[in-house]
Amino acid sequence: MNKVLVIGASGSLGKGVIKEIKGQFDITGTYTSRYFEVEGVKTQQLDITDANQFDALDKDFDSVFLVAGAMPAMMKGYTPQHYIDVNTTGVLNVLEYCRKNNIKKLVYIMTFSDVSGSFYTGVPIQDDAPRTLTLTGDHAVYSITKVAACDLIEHYHQEYGLQTIILRIPTVYCNDDNFNYYVDGELKVKAYVQMIRSIVNNHSIQVWGDPSNAKDMPYIKDFAALVSKALLHPTAQGIFNAGTGHPVSLEELVETMIRVFSPSEAVTKEYLPSKPSQPNFTFDMTKTNTIFDFEPSWTLEKSLQDILDTLGMETFKG
């Protein structure tokens, strides 16, 4: 059984993945400050910004799955230096740990912010699309540091032969109760949670912006399956889109939420076209599907039903 180090395993994405793949790998999951437990998974504290802390880790992992990173959704206020410390220096420390211990593979999570200039074109975004990151706003330094990390990762592939797989993700929807995130440094409730709560509690929902705008909405269980394939693939190399290739319009999302969360009671929709629209994009998944023999199996309705079955209706009431 392959021995895998999952760095950043205590958050929604890391924990969601290891819950799905723990039976396939011998996993050690790390956390910075928020201790967690998953049955069958070893845990260890690690701050990737401190190179000395890597000395306490085992040296015989087959692969590293690097999820840890500083991101706007987790940042209270605005401290751009933190992005550099974690997303660039921290990644360099991970790469050095791999090099020094002859660990053969790194799987890394990349934001889709590097191709944000390709949104709204109606053309599926390719894996090797030119970088078009936005250099203004609270996501700018974050995006810059993630791109720098990708360049460091490619350097370690070319210089030292490290097999590196970069998975470019949009928002991955999870079946946990981590409902809050930061917007411009202020704590908010995630939009899709607000929508579900409005359906459950008020039997109404606001539809903001253009309801035809559509985006990839991968579910955690599909994403975990792709991560497993990446960890096991002997030769895959480079950047791979990790969406669905099947964009979901806001209208479809609203209708599906109503079917799942209010199957027996009518829900009133209020259209507010002057409000901001959701992004409009989809990923071309041809390369990912071909190389990894991967096809998403969790439909939107199946995913929302799984969230409901896992968390229960009471979670969304009140």
Image (tube, grey):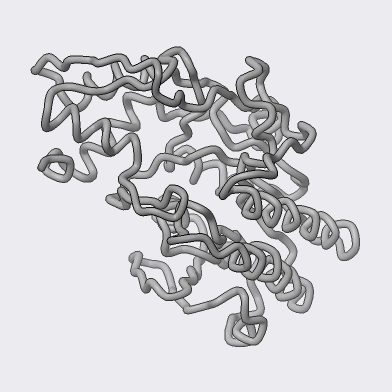
Give the residue displayed 51% in from the left and 21% down from the top.
247
Q: Position of residue 142 (x, y in %)?
A: 62, 54
Kindly tell me whether residue 23 is visible in this rendering. no
Q: For the point 59% across and 81% down, which residue is it?
A: 57
Q: Nearer the viewer, residue 171 or 78?
A: 78
Quarter placement of the N terminus: bottom right
Quadrant, the C terminus:
top left
- At 77% from the left edge and 56% from the top edge, which residue is drawn? 163
Q: Is residue 54 above or below residue 245?
A: below
Above/below status of 189 relative to 161? above
Please give the count of numbered marks on the rendered protein: 0
> Horizontal placement of 219 versus 112: left or right?
left
Q: Is residue 87 above or below residue 211?
A: below
Camera-side residue of 58 and 75: 75
Q: Is residue 262 left or right of residue 36?
A: left
Q: Nearer the viewer, residue 31 or 187?
A: 187
Q: Quadrant for residue 157, please give it.
A: bottom right
